[in-house]
Amino acid sequence: MTNIVIAGLGGQGVLKASDIVAEVAFRAGLDVKKSEIHGMSQRGGSVTSDVRFGERVYSPIVPPGEADYLVVLSPDQVEPNRWRLRKGGTLITPGAIPESTLHNKRSLNVALLGWLSVSLPFPESAWLETIRQNLAQKLHAANLQALAIGRAAAQKTLSVPNP
Amino acid sequence: MSGPDRLLLSGNEAVALAARDGDITLGTGYPGTPSTEILESFARLGGRAQWAPNEKVALEVGLGVAYTSARALVTMKHVGLNVSADPLFTAAYTGVTGALVVVSADDPGMASSQNEQDNRRYAVAAGVPMLEPADSQEAYDFLLLAIQVSERWSIPVLLRLTTRVCHSKTVVRPAGALGPSNAPATFVRDIKGRVMIPAYARPAHRRLREKLARIKEWNETHGPNREADGDRSLGIITAGISFMHAREAAPEAAVLKLGMSYPVPLEIIRRFAGSVSRCVVIEEGDPYLLEAIRAAGLRVEGKPEEYRFGELNVDRIKRILAADTSPEPVPPPGKPPELCQGCPHRSVFSALRNLDCIVASDIGCYTLAVLPPFEAADTCVCMGASIGVGLGLRHALPPEQARRVVSTLGDSTFIHSGITGLVEMVYNPPKTGHVVIILDNGTTAMTGLQEHPGTGRTLEHQPTGKVVIEDLVRSLGIASVHVTDPAANPAAFQELVAASLVTGDLTVIVARRNCLLAAGRIKEYERSAAREEILENCLEQQD
């Protein structure tokens, strides 16, 4: 089973990002669960969303210290959520995306998904199609660009062998 | 109706899909996290869905629908069932002709609520069968089953969801349409069955208990209760979302998962408990199942008291099974939510803070004014309580303090439960008068921008009859009524409040400015309504 936690602040697109990850895994035929708390989170407060996929998923909540990936959209939300990451898990932060490369800053959520997508076992085409289906047409260009930037940044980083 | 055979849906979306597939005639309710999206999704699927002014009215409308041969779905958050408890308890006596399913969305852990009451108690207290889904698939399946149970035994059914079921997305394979209700709806007179004067209510209560006994019998043999085989050294009895956490926490254990948790299928439980060497009841919230099982004389373990609070999860269940009562790790605090920058409520609560008011507040976004920098809320209890609590404070406090008391509540909250508070104010006015501020931002903001009777638009944002708040207030005989935009001139607003506090009159200030998040949409709805009106006028002229 793969465990992903996406964290950020209300209005940053945390829920949209987790919707996209969950749907990509769903399209691959896997069992998927996605969970978050709505409500007060809409008013600029901390928001987290959990996505789990595999052959069979029971609890929709990623247990503490079991996230394989922690994707954080706001730098100040890294420390409050670090406890969710497992030892050796991957932390993906806004720093992973070269500043000022995004056409639209609001696409940061999708750019970080681009980074994440390189490590997940789903074809790029599934991400493209899911993004198109989840966002309004006028947002497609900016978000597909953001996905490409995230993927390129990840490929560059991941191809550097560990010292 | 045919559709994709595999979907990824939230529990709320799954209930809505089942409402469509189950041919629900009318869905009604009042918005409340985590239940709100059910009716919105049902409307998007083509169902007939509408917001009621509050949950009591919603349940009464649903009951009327179900007194015909039609099917009704009524949705609310857990505290909404307190408001609609009055019709529910007697609806259990009268029963229904069609189907009546009441969704109670509980909020263990209080993600967005003022308490974490466990509404499973309501099933017992009212005497209505209760189904508890564990994921979106069961949310779908159990709504269809609830309709069948309701029709078969002519009884309202409680579908009890929790936040994690409502808002988690999981895979659903829809079973397909249930078959239509007995359309067209017909009325068959049944005076002794539906007019609950004592002479008719006494036999009705007996009939209810007989029905429940028959439903229990059915639940023992045909109910949606499942056993997952496992090592017999540990058996877990559970229901709802706790099943999912428990299965992951103890994959080797034998598990009895109850789908219909009232009437409790005690014979199934007795057999299961007897087949394992250690039997633990795992449930969120109150020890509801534990008490029922122990009352039947069975030896089972419960959870330590500290696990009554908050949601359960995999880690907490591991601790319960290990009888671990050491302090639980506390996750680092996140950033709390706040009133949006540019929110019109900001100028209201700045004024109340500057004037050192005692603020009896209410349920909505503006409850956030309790946090810094405003810290301008002194009470928040339940929908509409601001007015009654404010009046009580005024009655009891010495005059110099009483004159500082203000009640604040939102437009949707006022329509929901504030009107009777104003009636009380007119009928039993405090000696020092009172000041009520209705924060009219043109929407039910906290739950995600839903319409209400004061907006004059339906659930689907179409024009309909509109309750004009200031007209309603004036009609009660309240002379001092002001309508003003608090953000246009904050200093003038503060002066108005200050002046109202010293007059000793009964005063209502409608602080009106659209919610920042809703303003664009509201304009769009108004434009499209205006276009329709012009079009209709043109057509009339052509006739």
Image (cartoon, coloured by chain):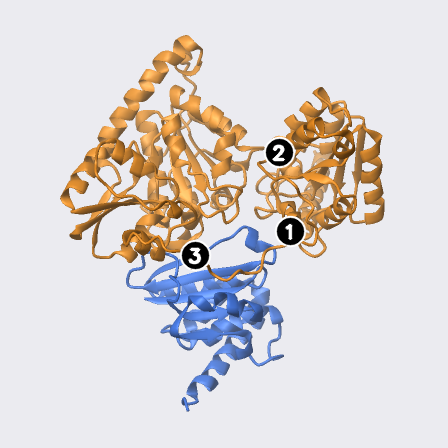
Q: In which quarter of the image is residue B283?
A: top left
Q: Determine the CA span between mark 2 and mark 1.
A: 20 Å
Q: In which quarter of the image is residue B199?
A: top left
Residue type, label 2: Gly
Residue nearest the viewer, comparing B198 with B53: B198
Residue type, label 3: Ser
Q: Is residue B235 left or right of residue B16?
A: left
Mark 1 crowd level (few <14, some 14–19, many ≥20, 10 Å Cα):
some
The spot of residue B519 in percent (x, y) is 69, 50
- Chain in orange? B
Q: Is mark 1 on a helix, strand or loop?
A: loop
Q: Which residue is denoted by mark 1 in the rendering?
A: B371
Quarter of the image that includes the C terminus of chain A: bottom left
Q: In this view, does B294 lie above or below A19?
A: above
Q: Determine the CA span between mark 2 and mark 3.
A: 31 Å
Q: In which quarter of the image is residue B324?
A: bottom left
Residue B94 visible within the image: yes
- Chain in blue? A
The spot of residue A16 in percent (x, y) is 51, 61
Residue depicted at x 73% and y 23%: B429
Counting the numbered discs, the total is 3
Identify the chain of the residue marked 2, using the numbered disc in the image: B
Q: Which residue is denoted by mark 3 in the rendering?
A: A35
Q: In this view, does B377 lie to the left or right of B136?
A: right
Residue nearest the viewer, comparing B428 with B534: B428
Q: Do labels 2 and 3 share a chain?
A: no
Q: Which residue is denoted by mark 2 in the rendering?
A: B384
Q: Do labels 2 and 1 share a chain?
A: yes
Q: Determine the CA span between mark 3 and mark 1.
A: 27 Å
